[in-house]
Image (cartoon, rainbow, N blue to C red):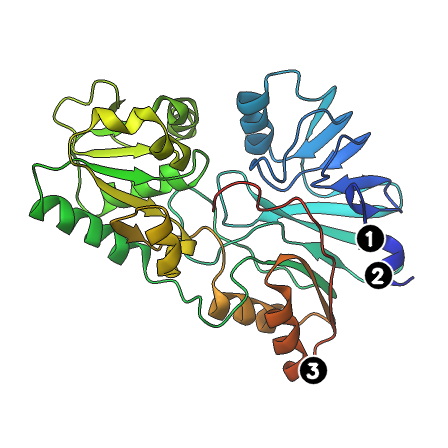
């Protein structure tokens, strides 16, 4: 059986016909398999959702306990219809997973979701899984994207705090994954003072702590005390909330901070290139490591990756799934 008879794109997202389920569907469906808790992949309203325990719990935090009629924890391997599915760590955010689809007769298809190869203190590391078809993102699918060591970027933040001790440092970081990663990196780099967080980050930071991830002492940004490092979702910087801080250093943690024009547009004084996605060298190295027969691209800069695959002699195709990357990286 051909791969495109087993899994193919629809207006609702990737659909597995042999198992009658969707992966990270864009609209409510009877049965969804979800790779991770970001809202462009994990949406409420499905009849049944299968995911890792942590992803299911994150969805409940974000959408309420009734986000689905039926939850199923992905205990590997699982038989669905005439395929076997298994979930494997993706290294992206807490609970993130790749989904391997193995039919009784046909190619092994790996849906990677969003993934990262750089060690991440708040996520299990990416697990390379041999496959025939590798379905990958290409968020940073151009050679210009080469992310530095995250600890080097955090050292730049701490150096700025030492140079300007009178100025609070406000870091824009997405609520799930990026905020906790920045906090953990700051702790690893030696910053043990209290860190202030915006109220929108509190519940997910609490959940990471409940999962055994040590984030140190966190205080409310509304009453930061002596805390000079403050984290908030990027949207807060466009609201009156930011006006409570006198002469802040505005920072933003994202792989997109490689593009200096984006930093200028956001008024970012201290861009931090910290990404939860693979950069170009990691993307191409992953494909070489897995050695799939074909590469399918869900979203991102697909033309650059397709050209690389052509040079490497690897058949590739764009799936052009619209609706991902709705949240900041």
Q: Residue at x 55, y 42 (%)?
A: 96
165 or 51, nearer to the observer: 165
Q: Earlier in the sequence, mark 3 or mark 2?
A: 2
Q: CA distance from mark 1 to mark 3?
A: 23 Å
Q: Secondary structure at mark 2?
A: helix
Q: Residue at x 37, y 39 (%)?
A: 173
- Do the numbered discs 1 and 2 sit on residues whose CB atoms are within 8 Å? yes
State the residue position of label 1.
7
State the residue position of label 3.
313
State the residue position of label 2.
3
Q: Quadrant of the N terminus?
A: bottom right
Q: Is residue 69 visible?
A: yes
- Do the numbered discs 1 and 3 sit on residues whose CB atoms are within 8 Å? no
Q: Secondary structure at mark 1?
A: strand
Q: Work out which residue is located at the far right of the displayed protein and give it.
A: 1
Q: Residue at x 75, y 35 (%)?
A: 32
The residue carrying pointer 3 sits among few (fewer than 14), some (14 to 19) or many (20 or more) residues within 10 Å by Cα, namely few
Compared with 328, 301 (above or below) is: below
Q: CA distance from mark 3 to mark 2?
A: 19 Å
């Amino acid at each position: 059986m051909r791969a495109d008879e087993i899994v193919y794109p629809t207006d609702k997202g990737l659909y597995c016909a042999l198992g009658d389920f969707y992966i990270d569907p864009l609209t409510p469906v009877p049965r969804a398999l979800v790779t991770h808790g970001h809202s462009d992949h994990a949406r409420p309203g499905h009849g049944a959702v299968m995911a890792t325990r942590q992803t299911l719990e994150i969805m409940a935090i974000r959408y309420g306990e009734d986000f689905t009629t039926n939850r199923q924890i992905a205990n590997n391997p699982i038989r669905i219809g005439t395929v076997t599915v298994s979930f494997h760590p993706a290294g992206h955010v807490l609970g993130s997973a790749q989904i391997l689809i193995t039919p009784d007769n046909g190619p092994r298809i790996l849906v990677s979701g969003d993934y990262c190869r750089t060690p991440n203190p708040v996520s299990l590391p990416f697990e390379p899984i041999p496959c025939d078809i590798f379905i990958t993102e290409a968020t940073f699918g151009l050679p210009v994207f080469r992310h530095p060591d995250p600890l080097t970027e955090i050292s730049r933040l701490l150096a700025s705090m030492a140079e300007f001790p009178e100025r609070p440092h406000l870091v824009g970081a997405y609520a799930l994954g990026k905020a906790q990663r920045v906090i953990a990196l700051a702790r690893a780099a030696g910053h043990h003072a209290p860190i202030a967080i915006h109220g929108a980050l509190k519940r997910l930071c609490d959940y990471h702590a409940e999962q055994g991830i040590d984030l140190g002492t966190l205080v409310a940004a509304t009453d930061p005390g002596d805390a000079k490092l403050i984290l908030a979702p990027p949207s807060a910087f466009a609201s009156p909330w930011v006006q409570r801080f006198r002469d802040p250093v505005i920072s933003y943690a994202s792989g997109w901070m490689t593009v200096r024009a984006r930093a200028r547009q956001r008024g970012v004084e201290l861009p931090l290139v910290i990404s939860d996605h693979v950069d170009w060298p990691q993307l191409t190295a992953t494909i070489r490591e897995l050695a799939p027969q074909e590469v399918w691209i869900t979203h991102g800069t697909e033309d650059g990756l397709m050209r690389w695959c052509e040079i490497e002699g690897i058949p590739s195709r764009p799936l052009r799934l619209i609706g991902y990357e709705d949240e900041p990286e």
